[in-house]
Amino acid sequence: DIYETTSINNEDLECLIEKLAQLRRSIKDLVGGYEPYNGVTQYVFTENIPYTALAGDPIYINKSELENLFYNLEQANMSTAVHKKDLLRILCHEVSHTFDNHLIASCVFDREFFAIMKELHAFNINGHELQDDFISRSPALSSGIYSYESFLGALLEHMNLLEDNNWSYIKETLLSLKENESGLSNAEKFQRFIGVLSDKSGVNLREKFSESEWQTLVNHFET
């Protein structure tokens, strides 16, 4: 029982669930109203996974990490700040993964990139303050080493997503790509995503990346 293995109380848990439900609704809106698993998200505590959490139906949470995950939950519930290792963020990340299923064939070229992008949207529009540790910009794309966090960080900057709340362009792009052909390679999905998002936003994203950054992206998705 979660109340026996952690110091959490019912009020804190209800607050966490309500926040997570709101984030889930925002992710659902971003992908055009799609509902994975008939609109039901289940969570199971287990000792049989080597990760903190694992997306699927249900979402598994590592039971051995419960005490650490629920530590200081009361303080976290009273704050809008979100850190990378916060329980709310971990759960939202796994929930975000479950909304990829209908997008994989047409536009998902990197599952972690898309999962974090959708959760960032949810946190941003619901007034949460993303802390500096949320997205790492190392290694830099210019180094020739691909990192989905560096790529996403660059996209957020080029699109001014967190400042100008231009998430509507992302939503329009996802809806447009979902309605088009499937069975594409990751390289084709990446190029189409950049092209359609550039058209929707009026921002030439290809020109926003330096030659070395762009080559890192192209090389990664072509392998």
Image (cartoon, rainbow, N blue to C red):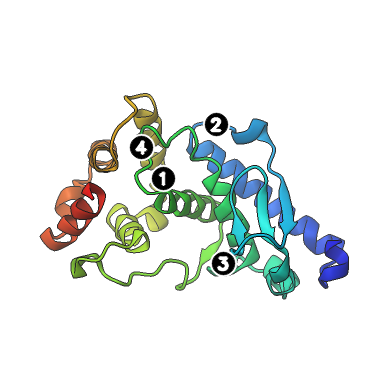
- Which of the 4 image quadrants contains residue 176? top left
Q: Earlier in the sequence, mark 3 or mark 4?
A: 3
> Which of the two discs, 2 and 1, sits closer to the camera?
2
Residue 84: percent from the left, percent from the top? Answer: 53, 68
Residue 76: percent from the left, percent from the top? Answer: 68, 70
x 23%, y 41%: residue: 191
Tell me the kind of residue under disc 2: Tyr
Q: Secondary structure at mark 4?
A: loop
Q: Which residue is nearer to you in this view: 92 or 29?
A: 92
> Which of the two discs, 1 and 4, sits closer to the camera?
4
x 24%, y 38%: residue: 188
> Which of the two discs, 3 and 4, sits closer to the camera?
4
Q: In the picture shown, does residue 86 fall above or below 102?
A: below
Residue 60: percent from the left, percent from the top? Answer: 66, 54
- Which of the 4 image quadrants contains residue 8? bottom right
Q: Earlier in the sequence, mark 2 or mark 1?
A: 2
Q: Which residue is nearer to you in this view: 170 or 178?
A: 178
Labelled disc at residue 82: 3
Q: Which residue is mark 1?
A: 167
- Numbered marks: total: 4
Tell me the kind of residue under disc 4: Cys
Horizontal side of 186 relative to 135 (left or right) equals left
Q: Earlier in the sequence, mark 3 or mark 1?
A: 3
> Which of the two discs, 3 and 2, sits closer to the camera?
2
Q: Quadrant of the N terminus?
A: bottom right
Q: Earlier in the sequence, mark 4 or mark 2?
A: 2
> Which of the two discs, 3 and 1, sits closer to the camera?
3
Q: Which residue is mark 2?
A: 34
Label 2 neighbour load within 10 Å: few <14, some 14-19, many 20+: some
> Which of the two discs, 4 and 2, sits closer to the camera?
4
State the separation of the CA atoms marked 3 and 2: 26 Å
Label 3 neighbour load within 10 Å: few <14, some 14-19, many 20+: some
